[in-house]
Amino acid sequence: MTRRSFSYLLTLPAAIAVRAQSPSAPVDAYTTFDADGTAHITRALPVPKTISPEAQALMMPGQRWVPAGGTKERASWMEKMQAVYPVDVKDTTVAGVDAWVVTPKHPAANKRERVLICLHGGGFTSDSGSQIESIPIAALTGTQVISVRYRLAPKFPFPAAVDDTVAVYKEALKTHKPKNIAVYGTSAGAVLGAQAMVQFRKLGLPLPAALGFFSGYVDLAHHYIDRNVGVLQDHNGLVRTRACIQLRRIVTAANCTPARKFLASLS
């Protein structure tokens, strides 16, 4: 036995005595112990100080990143966004699918032949980013972006969003080489991008140069439980949290069995 091990043995009775005297005394502000030694640990996620004061304010509870559509606040917000990110936004359809075509006012000379296809997030049930996920990208990269406003569940269940993405991609192939096309998406849009890639391959279409997969979750054919954020169950279409238990019906109607079979090809 080493000297260090022997010293640990000497201090063990004292440590046990302290624990017995105050079984629930917190070690820190976020940790408590039961008498049987069970630890209860919570997490504190402070607002990062590395972001601007304006961004910190948006992190406060009850704040919205984007004002509601059709309001004066939304119009003002869009004016400010386009002042920071100078682009032209065209409300149009591509291959019969609603889309924003976002063109930078200062396109990069070496990127005029390129196009990005944006697939917004929103849990497949809402549009939470078709503009905020395309306007900055178009301006910062100097590249035109087609932001696909694909059909949403539960009104349009799986595979409507995939079909819309395929239609837009086919249309892009008429005027752009595959090597000059990239697809990207966030959250549900990331998952949709992966779904679309599988479908492109099944249809024998040439694949784009890149797929940007941001904050997506796979494999959706499995069940997950995360007690920190709620329950993620049967979520082939949305995240089901404790506050949204009623939305389970949407999942069932939107994406369940056929989506599982489709997503199996991702593995």
Image (tube, helix red, strand yellow):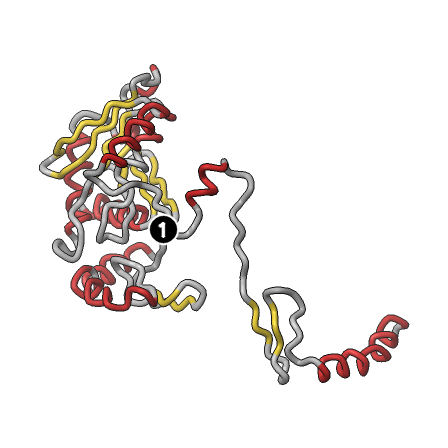
> For the residue carrying disc 1, how many other residues have a C-alpha within 10 Å: few (<14), some (14-19), or many (20+)?
some
Q: Which quadrant is home to the C terminus?
A: bottom left
* Residue at the extreme right: 3
* 103 up-or-down from 52: above or below: above
| Left or right of 37 on screen, residue 160 | left
> Residue 28: x and y, percent?
65, 65
- Residue drawn 25% across the image and 43% down it: 68
Residue sitting at 23 percent across and 52 percent down?
A: 124
Please identify the quarter of the rendering in which residue 9 is found.
bottom right
Q: Which residue is mark 1?
A: 216
Amino acid marked by disc 1: Gly
Q: Residue at x 37, y 25 (%)?
A: 84
Position of residue 141 relative to residue 131, above or below, is above
Which residue of the protein is positioned furthest toward the front in this rendering?
72
**Whole-percent x, y for residue 14 in the image:** 81, 80
**Quarter the N terminus occupies:** bottom right
